[in-house]
Image (spheres, rainbow, N blue to C red):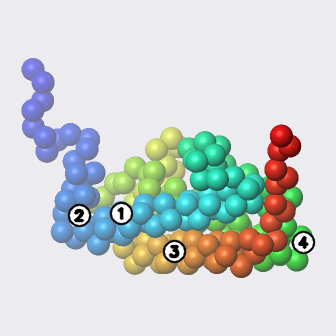
């Protein structure tokens, strides 16, 4: 006979994490992390469109479904081929920071979360079961702020330096 007692399932701690009042601040911060990271993804993707001279519809065919790590690597390579060294000196640190926040975000968003009443909340890598984070809502909120600021820096860079992009040569008829 199948076990119908839901309190003894291996998912109890995950359910508790999402629904217990003491974890609501962290659950909310993780939700905001997902939304804010979408803004960063958009900012890097939009910069890639501009650097390649692609329209939104054509750019989204190439860059639209890329995982962020791949998008960041390709955008950085395109930028090195597009901007002069003094401009890259401004942009390169943004790509380094993007790699860092992406890793930190992935550790939180893609983790297996385990909790015990009265103990810290731990996030484990789903594949290795190594501890990747012990998180509080305050720590996730700090990462959220970093991500929003970085997205703003990418958008500001594009607004400031877009004129330096080498315009594509129109096809001959």
Q: How far apart are labels 1 and 4 at the CA level?
A: 38 Å
Dot placed on the residue nearer the N-terminal end, 2 or 3: 2
Dot placed on the residue nearer the N-terminal end, 1 or 2: 1
Q: Quadrant of residue 29?
A: bottom left
Q: Of helix, strand and loop, which one carries label 3?
A: helix
- Side (left or right) of 103 relative to 90: left
Question: What residue is pinned by disc 2?
Answer: 117
Q: Is residue 25 visible?
A: yes
Question: What residue is pinned by disc 4?
Answer: 85
On the image, the x and y values in percent for residue 23 come to: 26, 67
Label ID, residue 148:
3
Question: What residue is pinned by disc 1?
Answer: 31
On the image, the x and y values in percent for residue 77 come to: 80, 55
| Residue at 64% in and 65% down | 98
Q: Quadrant of the C terminus?
A: top right
| Residue at 20% in and 40% down | 9
Dot placed on the residue nearer the N-terminal end, 1 or 4: 1
On the image, the x and y values in percent for residue 48 come to: 69, 57
CA neighbours of label 3 inside 10 A, class few (<14), some (14 to 19), many (20+): some
Q: How far apart are labels 3 and 4 at the CA level?
A: 26 Å
């Amino acid at each position: 006979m199948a076990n119908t007692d839901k309190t003894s399932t291996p998912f109890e701690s995950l359910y508790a994490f999402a629904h217990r009042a003491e974890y609501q601040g962290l659950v909310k911060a993780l939700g905001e992390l997902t939304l804010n990271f979408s803004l960063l993804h958009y900012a890097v993707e939009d910069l890639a469109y501009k650097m390649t001279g692609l329209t939104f519809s054509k750019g989204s065919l190439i860059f639209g479904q890329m995982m962020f790590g791949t998008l960041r690597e390709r955008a950085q390579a395109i930028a090195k081929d597009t901007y002069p060294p003094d401009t890259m000196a401004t942009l390169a640190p943004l790509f380094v920071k993007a790699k860092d926040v992406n890793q930190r975000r992935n550790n939180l968003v893609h983790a297996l979360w385990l909790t015990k009443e009265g103990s810290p909340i731990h996030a484990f890598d789903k594949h290795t079961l190594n501890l990747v984070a012990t998180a509080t809502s305050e720590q996730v909120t700090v990462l959220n702020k970093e991500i929003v600021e970085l997205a703003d820096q990418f958008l500001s860079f594009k607004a400031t330096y877009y004129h330096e992009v080498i315009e594509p040569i129109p096809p001959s008829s």
